[in-house]
Image (cartoon, helix red, strand yellow):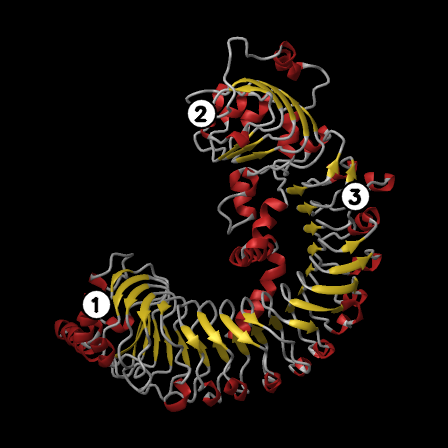
Amino acid sequence: MAQGFLFFLLFSYIISINIHACNQIERCSLLSFASTLSSPPLNWTSLDCCHWKGITCDQDDWVTHLVLPSKGLKGGISPSSLRNLTHLTYLNLSHNSLYGSLETQFLLSLNRLEILDLSYNHIYGELPLSLPSSKIRTIDLSSNHFFGAIPSSFFQQASNLISFNVSNNTFTGYVPSSICLHHSPFIRLLDFSSNQFSGNLALGLGECSKLQVFRAGHNNLLGLLPEDIYNSTKLEEISLPINSLRGAISDKIVNLTNLKILDLSHNQLSGELPLNLGKLSKLKFLTVDFNNLEGTIPTSLMNCTNLVELCLGINNLEGDISMLNFSRLSQLTKLDLRYNNFTGMFPASLYSCRYLKAIALTRNHLEGQIQIEILSLKSLSFLTLGYNRFTNLTGAMKILMSCKSLHTLSLDGSFVDERMAFDDGMVDFDGFQNLRVLNMAGTNLTGEIPVWLSKLKNLEILILAFNQITWPIPSWLGNLPRLFLSTCQITKFQVNFQSNFVDYPDLSNNNIVGYIPAEIGQLHLLRQLALYSNNFSGVIPDQISNLQNLEVLDLSMNHFSGPIPSSLASLTFLRKFNVSYNNLGGPIPTSTQIQTFTTSAFEGNLKLCGAPLPNKCGSNMGIDEDDTNNKDLDNEPHQLPWFYIFTALGFVVGFWGVCGSLVVNKTWRYVYFRFIDNVQDRLYVMVTMPINTMKRRLRG
């Protein structure tokens, strides 16, 4: 009796497995798909594939969902296996390392598919001629290697398409902006950004009555924005940065009353900002920098009380910005007005924007003094005021010292011809405790390095090039623990910049006196040593030959004496060498890379001889005794602790070495300012994290 009962239970279990198991053809197809992958095991071992991880079945045990994002899958997509999943409605294999092409037959077999997400893989090839069925609602093929034009027939079966994202591929041809005319009237998101689309944007977007997000930045688009885009009144985001769009921003943009993000930066737009731009009351991010816009900032813009970022920099805008009432922009966190022609005082109304974290006013015609009310900006961490006409540097620094959140302060080219900020009351004041970057280059400042700098224990970058510093650099700068960073530390500070500025100390164009210490040879990371136009003296130390990464050595226009060390021949990466206009003597080392530079690198040294100079070395040509004796001066008691000086100021960067090239080449200017923006964003995570989070929520 008992044996019969056990047999009955076993029979019932077998029957239940057969009734509630997934389709065996689909199970075999999934196993075949998994077998083509060289990746972490999926642990698909049980009999019923409906219970496998990433698999969902309907009530009839047909596989409807294959969802395996970010599983480390590697290998080719096998159309022959997945083609049998004929009831599949949701396919998500995003954020893996899959490759292969998107074959037409593969898609046609999935005629019930509603969501297709293959983003962030290595899938390549052209798109098939058409989508599988009218049921498709979401397509995300972003961040792959698709190429070619998008076929005009691709959307014929996409009458229910809501979201289409093919960003970060290499698609060419025209943006299919006619998608809404005949095929997909319900589309809400179109993302064509970071491809190679070209030509003008065609008409058709105006038929997208439900379109909320339109992105096509980082392409080669030309011409004007299509007029009918202003009929898509549901639009919340238009992002078209880094293209070649021309013309003025149409006054019709005020029809887009739901607009929250407008990014037209890095284009060739001209004309004036629309007078009634303030009607876009929901606007949160207005980014139109790097264009050719003219005129004044419309006063109506102050009605956009939800603005979080306002970026109008690098244009030809003008007007007295102190007359604008920024106090209404109570949510503002970032203001970029740099490189324009604005006049007036520092806008006092900005002091009411309590959430401000970044202010960039560089290269305008502003004047006056910094007021103590700036201390009301408790979150201010980034402030650039360079190349304006501000006065009273000492007063400004005494005020800004109390900005507890300030990380970057750039005053280059402002406060011209004043003395270094110095006041007895500043020495004992515990300010600037979070300051990491201080730029005072190109200001023609005089005097000595102030003692209060010794208190800045978090200072990482100090830029003092192109001033008239006449005193020896104080030894206490060597006590600043973070001023000279190792490679790993600077990489953490500047995530997106591969060649670290720490490799390029520049003390040029000052009046620094003293000798180069032998300890200079310990700074093995140096790639550039620029000491030209100072009052250095003594001999060129042999230890410079230890700097095997050195690419630029410029010691010109100083008072160096003695020979050119033959040991410098070991510097095999030198691409620039200049010791002109010193008091050097003796033969130029022969059979070395040094001898390959032109005569301009050696001129102005009357006692030098040998190729490439025309004067030959005679038997009596040598070095004066007083020059030879200078070799021992490094050990004298009065010798400055130069090792600490080079360590402390290893991050000083010359101004014109960068900006001279930017004036000539527009493309370099774009790259440079994008880099500056990246540095700002990475340096202040606290500044950008809330903004980016908000953007993702908006775009979601």
- Residue under label 1, please give it: 78
Using the numbered discs, state the Cα–Cα distance from disc 3 to disc 1 in whole angstroms. 66 Å
Residue 545 position, x and y percent, is: 50, 24
User: How many circles with numbers are drawn on the protein?
Assistant: 3
- Residue under label 2, please give it: 570
- The tag on residue 97 is none
Label whose residue precedes the other's in the sequence (1 or 2): 1
Q: Which quadrant of the rendered structure holds the N terminus?
A: bottom left
Label 2 residue SS:
helix
Left/right placement of residue 153 relative to residue 241 reads left
Q: Are marks 3 and 1 in contact (CB under 8 Å)?
A: no
Residue type highlighted by circle 1 = Ser
Q: Is residue 253 above or below residue 391?
A: below
Query: Between residues 298 and 640, which one lies in front from this camera angle?
Result: 298
Query: Between residues 684 and 556, which one lies in front from this camera angle?
Result: 556
Q: Can residue 621 be spotted in the picture?
A: yes
Label 1 residue SS:
loop
Label 3 residue SS:
loop
- Count residues near mark 1 (Cα–Cα under 10 Å), then give few for <14, some for 14-19, many for 20+: many
